Image (spheres, grey):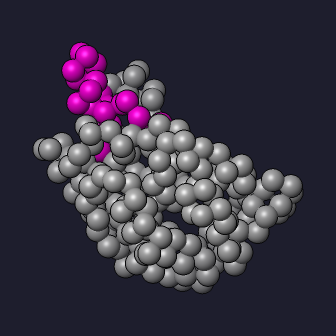
């Protein structure tokens, strides 16, 4: 994202999914289009769309934010020490996807480092006032990985205002509800440009 902004002067809409909310929010910090225009630079982040994503404040780990317990579907030290896998993957991540597609996609899943869940989040773009009116959260209402109560907690505890839209999907909304997700994202591009 940085090279598209810095080297090519592109405008971007940051869309973060699941754990991607933490590194994505960190990567976008200080890169808003508005701030960059004020210092004579082209390109920047137009706004932020979080889709069933982690919204964790700077200096706090996801594990601490969630009360010190890993999600029950994370299998620790699998396939090796310090790594985690999701089990059952299809029921947790692809519960609203047809079985053939779910099986095919689950074959691509890779282990995730437990340390990522235990490390403090960097500075987060969503805390910046320049994104007031330019923050959206797509709430996946059938999500088995991040139930709506957890998604709501992320939004409420952030202390900032989000435009929340429900998507009738499991965790991987961009698979099961691709058209709806694309329409929402395109709509946000237009509205964030106008804000």
In which image quadrant can residue 19 be found? bottom right
Residue 179 visible in the current orientation: no
Residue 122 lies within the magenta run: no
Residue 146 visible in the current orientation: yes
In which image quadrant can residue 161 be found? bottom left
- Residue lying at 67% horizontally and 65% vertically, measured from the top left: 70
Q: Is residue 158 above or below residue 138?
A: above
Relative horizontal placement of residue 127, taking residue 129 as reference (left or right): right
Q: Between 76 and 68, which is closer to the camera in this rendering? A: 68
Q: Is residue 3 above or below residue 133?
A: above
- Residue lying at 86% horizontally and 57% vertically, measured from the top left: 80
Q: Is residue 119 above or below residue 86?
A: above
- Residue lying at 44% horizontally and 41% vertically, measured from the top left: 124
Find the magenta span and give its range: 26-47
Relative horizontal placement of residue 34, taking residue 17 as reference (left or right): left
Relative image position of residue 59 (x, y in whole percent) = 54, 42
Relative horizontal placement of residue 8, taking residue 92 as reference (left or right): left
- Residue lying at 47% horizontally and 37% vertically, measured from the top left: 123
Relative image position of residue 163 (x, y in whole percent) = 25, 60
Which quadrant would the C terminus be assigned to in this image?
top left
Relative image position of residue 54 (x, y in whole percent) = 49, 57
């Amino acid at each position: 994202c940085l090279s598209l902004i810095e080297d090519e002067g592109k405008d971007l809409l940051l869309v973060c999914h699941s754990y991607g909310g933490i590194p994505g929010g960190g990567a976008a910090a200080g890169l808003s289009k508005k701030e960059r225009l004020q210092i004579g630079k082209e390109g920047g982040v137009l706004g932020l769309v979080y889709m069933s994503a982690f919204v964790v404040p700077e200096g706090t780990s996801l594990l601490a934010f969630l009360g010190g317990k890993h999600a029950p579907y994370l299998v620790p030290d699998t396939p090796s020490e310090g790594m985690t896998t999701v089990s059952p993957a299809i029921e947790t991540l692809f519960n609203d996807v047809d079985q053939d597609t779910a099986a095919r996609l689950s074959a691509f899943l890779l282990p995730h480092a437990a340390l990522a869940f235990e490390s403090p989040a960097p500075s987060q773009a969503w805390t910046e006032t320049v994104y007031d009116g330019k923050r959206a959260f797509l709430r996946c209402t059938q999500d088995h990985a991040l139930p709506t109560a957890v998604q709501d907690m992320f939004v409420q505890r952030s202390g900032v205002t989000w435009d929340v839209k429900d998507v009738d999907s499991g965790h991987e909304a961009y698979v099961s509800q691709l058209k709806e997700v694309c329409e929402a994202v395109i709509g946000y591009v237009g509205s964030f440009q106008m804000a």
